[in-house]
Image (cartoon, helix red, strand yellow):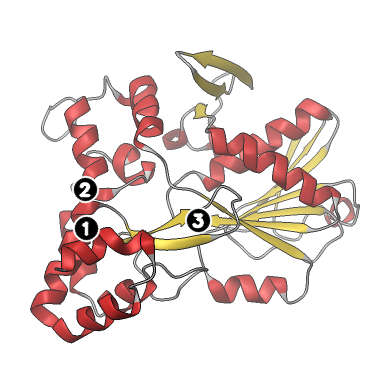
Amino acid sequence: MKRNSVSGVTTLTLVDGDTFDGRSDRGSIMIVRECYEQLAEIVFSTINAKWKVLLTGTPGIGKSFFLSFICYKILQTDPAATIIFQDAEKTRLLINGFMATRGHEDSFEMELASTETWYLVDGCMPQGVEAKTILVTSPNPEYFKRWQKHEKVKKYLMPVWSFEELEACWSLLYRTRINAFTNAAFAFDVLRERWLKFGGVPRTVLFKWEEEFEEELQIALGRSNLDAALAAVGKAGIQTGVSDMLMHIRVDKDFVKSYYTPASAYIRKQIVNDFRRQRKGVLKDFVRDSEDIKELSTLRGDIF
């Protein structure tokens, strides 16, 4: 893996034709976000204090890529480190020096019993082991409680992408792409339109840029989760029943405190319009109850 900097954008590139997670759709180039460096420092400090780490955030923002970045950082410090990846399918990959060995969900028990081993888990419940454990996963309160009940766990959150980050990724990896269905180019105007509509999630704005998602958005707005969406706005912690297409988790600089906001101004107005038609009383209650929350002033303005 090679580290490069192009036009102020830091990347990690896999060599010899390899792709991240062994999947061709993941590509071989990773954009190193500024928050990756900041979170890595916090994660390593937490692990050194003998805690395990849980990292979550809005789905589709690159939490899985962050595990690969953590692996890179570990090997930069200790090329002979023992690292075990476990994915959502519960298959495991052992990296030891220059060797990599695949196994099933019960493999490498001896290595996991060592406090020197790194155990990097993506999207499934980690095994209770002595290894230094880092779990990345989409928000799931019950999932968190189950793991935290039996382990010393610190939880951190990854922020959504800024438009500047999305633009840098688009410029490096997507700007020359052509829509296979319409033969249209992925122009800057398309990028900006998708960001304004869907917010700072690269999976939706960049990776799946050929998909409109209008039907999925209308389905999300039409479900009974509108109450949950409005109830979650401004709330701290992970809320249940909230559509990640409608609501994103905004994260403070400490990567600990967070609150929910609509994914974009477009979606905010869609939510308000739907509530005006369906539930005027709920909107009035929301305006009254959120009067002292400054982050919600724009949403209250839309309601009026």
Give amino acid for label 3. Gly
- Side of 74 relative to 232 (left or right): right
Q: Residue 66: image x %, image y %?
A: 59, 41
Which quadrant holds residue 178? Answer: top left
Q: Residues within 10 Å of mark 1 (few under 14, many from 20)?
A: many
Task: Give the Cα distance between marks 1 and 2.
Answer: 7 Å
Say what amino acid the circle numbered 2 marks. Answer: Lys
In front of the other: 292 or 285: 292
Look at mark 1 in the image and give the residue it sits on: 267
**Residue ID for mark 3:** 57
Q: Earlier in the sequence, mark 1 or mark 3?
A: 3
Q: Earlier in the sequence, mark 3 or mark 2?
A: 3
**Secondary structure state at the residue bearing disc 3:** strand
Q: CA distance from mark 3 to mark 2?
A: 19 Å
Q: Nearer the viewer, residue 282 or 229?
A: 282
Q: Secondary structure at mark 1?
A: helix
Q: Which residue is mark 2?
A: 197
Residue 286 in percent (x, y) is at: 28, 78
Q: Dots 1 and 2: beta carbons under 8 Å?
A: yes
The amino acid beneath tag 1 is: Ile
- Could you tell me which quadrant the C terminus lies in? bottom left
